[in-house]
Amino acid sequence: MAKQWFEKSYRRSLVDMHIPDWDERFLSQFDSQEYIRLMKLARVESFYIYATSCVGLANFPAKAGNVHKGLAERDVIQEITTAANDQGMNVIVYYNIWSKWAYDHHPEWRVVNAKGQGTADYMWDQPGRYGVCCINSPYREFVKEQLEELCNNYTFDGLWIDMILLPQTICYCSSCRKRYYDETGRSELPRTIDWEDPDFVSFQRRREAWLNDFTAMLTQASKQIKPHISMGYNVSSYSVGWQSGGNVQFFNQNDYLSGDVSSDPLIVTYTCKLFHSSNPKHSIEFMTSVVDSNLLEHTIMKSKEYLRTQLYLTISHNAAFGFIDAIDPIGTLNEKTYAIMGQLFSELIPLEPYLDPASDFCQDVAIYTNFESLVDLRDNTRATKDVDVSVSPHFMASLTAAKSLINANISFGVINSYSMAELDKYQVIILPDLLVISQEEVETFRSFVEKGGSLYASANTSLLDNEGNRHDDFMLAELLGVSYVGKTVENHTYIAPTDKGSFMLPGYSQKYPLTLNSHQHVVRAHESAETLATIVLPEINAANVHQFSSAISSPPEIITTHPAVVANHYGAGKSIYAAGPLELMEKEEQRKSFIQLIKSLLHKPVWFESDAPKPVEITLFHQQENHRFILHAVNIQKELPNIPVDKINIRVKLGDKQPTEVKVLPSNNALPFAHDGQYVEVELPRLDTYLMLVVDYSSD
């Protein structure tokens, strides 16, 4: 079967065109031929063209009459799609769900927050800019009709729907109230957050179902007219948590996973790994702006070195890189941006023949995440009107765990329930403060460990089910070897090693234990379990704030027998439970302790070993049909340009395969290597920003 455009295109671009038309100059100088010329200058293969923007104005003769006045009745979509097709470029039509035009013309369609405000009153602290209409209102038909117009009248390769996730708030409009009543018989929408209240959680599942229903309708309507186009939705906002309404079913609506994320390299690698494991073809795209501060600074471009790092970090996951620029209000673009991106993309072209999203991602460890745990128990009992978007403890613990694994040169992935049938490919599964868990997940993790897998879990993991029921004990209690008793009052605690746990805390003791900047759960270890560390507490009297052992610090004073870290054998496998989120801690000694625990759970030879320094991330892919491994090494230093790194040694596991050659790509320069019967060992040449190596082996 022939590959679709998104399976073979790695160089992409999107130009933001969120331009109103109250001034006749706006977009009046837009030139389609110049637009295409700049895309070619940037060496772009596939690009997005705006049919509408968040201001809701159409760049084509839309029947609704919301056409941008500055285009003087031109049909920009026709101009661009025709020119792109003539040039052999892939063109994806961009449609924005937000619409200030519809918001202004149809007040009855508006999203209304718990304070009775429309989004133009408060969104992103920029009043007047953003009008969002509710997907339960008649606006849903308006969007469907505009997409049908586009599909009927133009030739293009895909549709990409932006701002599709719910607008980071619960909507209290009349359409939502009616739909909720029709489906549940309840006339009032919840006004108080409580993740331990099944009624509130049931309402949240309704919101997720509404989003899934809306996207399914748009996909079906579009593909009924154009069966072969790709459908993509911007999924990047999933990480903000429950407010966005994202779930696995929403991810499954996408032919490829794509999102705009303007953040540090850790977010790039985490996002790429999650997207890779959550798409059947592993077709993913990482988008980021070329301008600092998410395009707000407009003329200040990110450094070439920074963009190069993000580009190579992206392709080290076999992902496409999409850069985002913003058009000038009059419709022009800065040629300098496209010349720089052309230079960067020119570096990528000779590497593309070696990229293959279908190849096997070699990973020993997996960080497990689910959408249901992207919540914060500290929000319980708070009014919905008082809660802003915040990053969940689970997400932060996942990110910090990812950084520790990179620093330790441990190969890892990020997975969710989409990958549950493939857990056996990993040695260790990490559940970082995974508060909410389904019965299906419980049974899957039990089976995984029982068959010989290893599992690490921390803090609140499995205290709630996905229907909002708080259990008296951990749902994974039998597997983890601990039972829930309570929680420390202190939010600054310590862990002290036992004799059996000295390997994870060398140099620490009961008198001088390791700091944990968080609460810990008080648990009872089962008879089958081994306590590796215990809780030590500071001398603080919660009932009398004047009673403390030190005014400035909170030194360890109270030695307890409460387990802080527990190891448990279950079936043929093993688990470790940490009573506090050890993986969330960022100090070097804390990271080392977490990594020691993960290493103790590895029970087979790992995919690779390396002495690479912390700023270097290594990824490895197996291309079985080509009888080769492809290794990527990316230098991700905080201060740029990078200081080159010399003499990195890497050992790659081949098993019983016989290596024939190790080469640097794309130059094909051969490197000397050693082979001990299982591992190939090679010293990398000087690493500036990026190196790609191929390890070929015999097909016999």
Image (tube, helix red, strand yellow):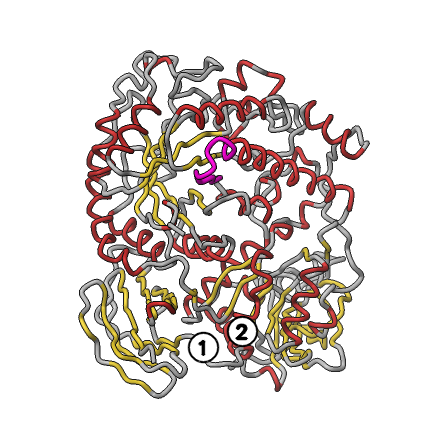
- Residues at circles 2 and 1 in contact by the CB criterion of under 8 Å: yes
Q: Position of residue 595 (x, y in %)?
A: 50, 73
Quadrant where the C terminus sits is bottom left
Residue beneath the point at 38% across and 50% down: 3
Using a 10 Å C-alpha cutoff, classify the residue at mark 2 as few (fewer than 14 neighbours), some (14 to 19) or many (20 or more): many
Using a 10 Å C-alpha cutoff, classify the residue at mark 1 as few (fewer than 14 neighbours), some (14 to 19) or many (20 or more): some
Q: Which is more N-terminal, label 1 or label 2?
A: 2
- Taking the image as shown, residue 618 lies to the left or right of residue 139, namely left
Q: Position of residue 287 (x, y in %)?
A: 38, 44
Residues under labels 2 and 1: Cα distance? 9 Å
Residue beneath the point at 62% across and 21% down: 138
Q: Which residue is mark 2?
A: 427
Q: Secondary structure at mark 1?
A: loop
Q: Position of residue 429 (x, y in %)?
A: 57, 68
Between residue 530 and residue 446, name the one nearer to us. 446
Q: Which residue is mark 1?
A: 606
Looking at the image, the residue that sits furthest to the front is: 1
Q: Is residue 130 magenta?
A: no
Dot 1 amino acid type: Val
Above or below, 326 relative to 505? above
Residue beneath the point at 43% across and 68% down: 362
Kindly identify which numbered label has been placed on residue 673: none
Above or below, 222 relative to 421? above
Between residue 56 and residue 223, name the one nearer to us. 223
Between residue 601 and residue 12, name the one nearer to us. 12
Above or below, 634 relative to 497? above
Q: Secondary structure at mark 2?
A: loop
- Taking the image as shown, residue 206 lies to the left or right of residue 141, namely right
Segment colored magenta: 222-233
Q: Position of residue 695 (x, y in %)?
A: 30, 73
Above or below, 157 relative to 145? below
